[in-house]
Amino acid sequence: MRKTLLLFALMASAFSFGQVPIGSGTLVDSNAGLSTPISIYYSTSLSQTIYFASEIGTAGTITSIDFMLNTTGSLANTNTMIDVWVGHTSRASYNPVVGASGADWISVASHSHVLTNGSFTLTGTTLRFTFDTPFAYNGTDNLVITVDANKAGDDGNTIKFYQAAATTDVTSLMIRTDQAAENADPLNPPLSYTGTTTATSVQAKRTRPQIVLNGITLGVDEHGLASRIAIYPNPVTDNLFIGSEDKAAVGEIYTLTGQLVRSAAVEQNKVSVDDLASGVYLLKLRMEDGTAATKRFVKQ
């Protein structure tokens, strides 16, 4: 019996249930109607946002997502009739050119429909979408989140979602309307909308809503991998050496905003960084067995 209890204790310690926050600060949209992920000031809205693998830092299972609001208040006219899709993407940005085809939206056809005609919970200034079906994030691709809100009515222009610092490229798309019948179809979204209201075009944004990914579950391999890898010297000037029992195949270097600087094979357990500008970077190591781990380093 004691051996059985010990086994359960070891299994429990080998898994971690946590949160991954992305974004901070008090930045909000000056236009309440464009405050992603949901336009609280309009009856309906459709938004799509890309988050970077380098910001998440690990594979895991996501069970819910939190969005942060700038103030408390009732959102009764916004809640219910909400659909959320989550998926993987190799893309890191959108083409900001508005055209009639709508081709620049990332298709949700192959994404997980994690919330169907559902609602959110509001606790203070935290708005949470709890998934009907958890999403298994692979830790390698970027993450794309699509939110479709259809309930008629609005909740004014006071409450806004906190946004993360602006990215260099367009990382969010948003369209909204005051007529429920004109809501954009998430399975066939337009890039140039022709409804009867003034909010008739898709808006390309460089800000993204601050989020917290909840329920990230790390298995034994993923949970222990990063702790088994050492990178040195750190800070570094030219060559970054990798110490690990697991052989690294490829090293990807990202900025802290998630932009890929370059990808290169790991040769002789080292990655050359002498051409990088001074600053803080993320090194994502892809191992030969298919696992991955991310380490932070400083380039002098």
Image (cartoon, rainbow, N blue to C red):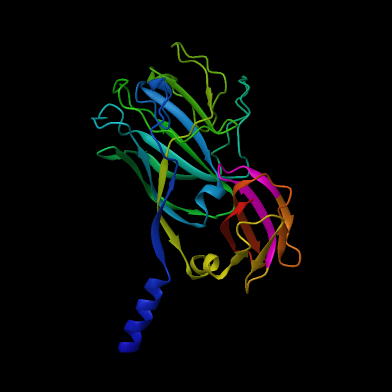
Instruction: Residue 68 in the image: state x and y as whole percent.
Output: 35, 38
Q: Nearer the viewer, residue 73 or 89?
A: 73
Say which residue appears at 35% left-offset and 25% top-offset. Answer: 40
Say above or below: 263 vs 197: below
Side of 290 where 48 appears, left or right = left
Q: Residue at x 48, y 14 (%)?
A: 195
Label tally: 0
* Residue range (magenta): 248-262
Query: Is 279 a magenta residue?
Result: no
Residue nearer the viewer, 185 or 7: 7
Observer-nearest of 31 and 24 = 24
Image quadrant holding the N terminus, namely: bottom left
Does residue 277 sit above or below 73 in this rendering? below
Q: Position of residue 59 (x, y in %)?
A: 52, 57
Residue 89: x and y in percent read 59, 44
Question: Based on the displayed image, in which of its 4 quarters is residue 26 positioned?
Answer: top left
User: Is 232 situated above or below 191?
Assistant: below
Q: Quadrant of residue 283?
A: bottom right
Q: Position of residue 23 (x, y in %)?
A: 45, 41
Q: Would you say the magenta stretch is mainly helix, strand or loop? A: strand
Nearer to me, 176 or 300: 300
Please check the rendered image and state whether residue 251 is part of the magenta-colored stretch, yes or no: yes
